[in-house]
Image (cartoon, rainbow, N blue to C red):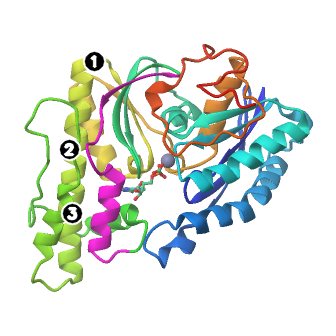
Amino acid sequence: MRVLAIESSCDESAAAVLDGTRGLLAHELYSQVALHRVYGGVVPELASRDHVRKLLPLVRRALAAAGSGPGDLSGVAYTAGPGLIGATLTGAALARSLAYAWGLPAVGVHHLEGHLLAPLLEPDPPPFPHVALLVSGGHTQLIEVHGIGQYRILGDTRDDAAGEAFDKTAKLLGLPYPGGPELARIAADGTEGVFHFPRPMLDRPGLEFSFSGLKTAVLHALRGRELDERLRADVACAVQAAIVETLTVKAARALEQTGFNALVVSGGVSANLTLRAQIASAAARHGARVYYPRIEFCTDNAAMIAMAGLHRLRAGERQGLGIAARAQWPVESLAPLGAAGARHVNGWDGD
Ligand code: KG4
Ligand code: ZN
């Protein structure tokens, strides 16, 4: 089985071809970062328009790189949500139309299921069940993963996501969008302990997160000071330390609570090297192994959508002729693999 996948839920346009036996044959990505940078964040309408321009050439390139034509494909997968609705619709409409034109089945993939299954693209995939720490720009969740489509949320954020906390505090430091990687880069030059920011909800039992207080704490720290390189680096270092420690302690707590010995860390923030190092030592103390996607598949990409789509198509899931796209879509509402029936996929009947 060979699948073409399209991702367009935010500011990355991507296409990939995944083969069930030969693995990942091609993946192409175009990042809109430069387009949105002048505005300090993603402008949804600009994102949609740029996806319209970029997706089809990316699909052509991915198919050429995979040495595949439509006749070699068994289906088309696409991100159907959650995401910016206009952006998601562009990829959904393209993917659904290509599948129709080529006489192939289509399947709408949950973006977060894509992130959760991204480590399955690696040579040493995680076993089930495992705990997943999903840390992206829009989500911060600890999830008990019993199998594909079998997700139980153990903890969620009450306000900002971890990636959002990185991005918002980076903005206060005058760093360009997207702030997460920029903040992580300058944090390396900061001195630990110059600032100490709160680790909300760490002193309480449970697996909930809250990151919105960090912005205020950073604003207070910056008040009345001149924002020079030294200050920027020290604050960045303290912000990263607060986010990383919070995520690490809660992930370790989730391992303890479930008794599982495998931890998946995925989503954009899992590209953070300090987080990776601290999670690795915490997991080792719990006798658990950590599984990540490779760095380029931590942030949005179509390879992970292809992986989720391949599994769902293989299990016989098919979507109707409707174009499925949702801004909101809880991951725990997904059906276990193959349980959704031949036409009705995860609540959609499409046509
Ligand atoms: O998964 P993703 O590409 O998009 C969403 O689905 O949200 O995640 C993007 C998020 C952004 O908030 C970005 O700042 C953050 O991941 N991010 C990082 C790093 N790389 C990306 N945050 C901290 N350190 C990084 N190295
Ligand atoms: Zn994402």
The residue nearer to you, when weighing 73 against 335, is: 335
**Relative horizontal placement of residue 45, taking residue 138 as reference (left or right):** right
Asked if labels 1 and 3 touch by Cβ distance under 8 angstroms, the answer is no
The segment highlighted magenta reads 149-175
Query: Which amino acid does the dot numbered 3 rest on?
Result: Lys
Q: Which residue is mark 2?
A: 246
Could you tell me the amino acid type at mark 2?
A: Thr
Closer to the camera, 324 or 300?
Answer: 324
Residue matched to label 3: 215
Q: Nearer the viewer, mark 3 or mark 1?
A: 3
**Residue marked by disc 1:** 258
Q: Residues within 10 Å of mark 3 (few under 14, many from 20)?
A: many
Tell which circle, 3 or 2, labels the residue nearer the N-terminal end: 3
Amino acid on which disc 1 is placed: Thr
Q: Quadrant of the C terminus?
A: top right
Image mark for residue 188 = none
Disc 1 to disc 2, C-alpha distance: 18 Å
Asked whether disc 1 touches disc 2, contact meaning CB atoms under 8 Å apart, the reply is: no
User: Helix, strand or loop at disc 3?
Assistant: helix
Residue at 27%, 74% in the rendered image:
173
Above or below residue 300? Residue 333 is above
Q: For residue 21, which quarter of the picture?
A: top right
Q: Which of the 4 image quadrants contains residue 54?
A: bottom right
Q: Residue at x 11, y 71 (%)?
A: 221
At horizontal 82% and vertical 44% (from top left) the residue drawn is: 97
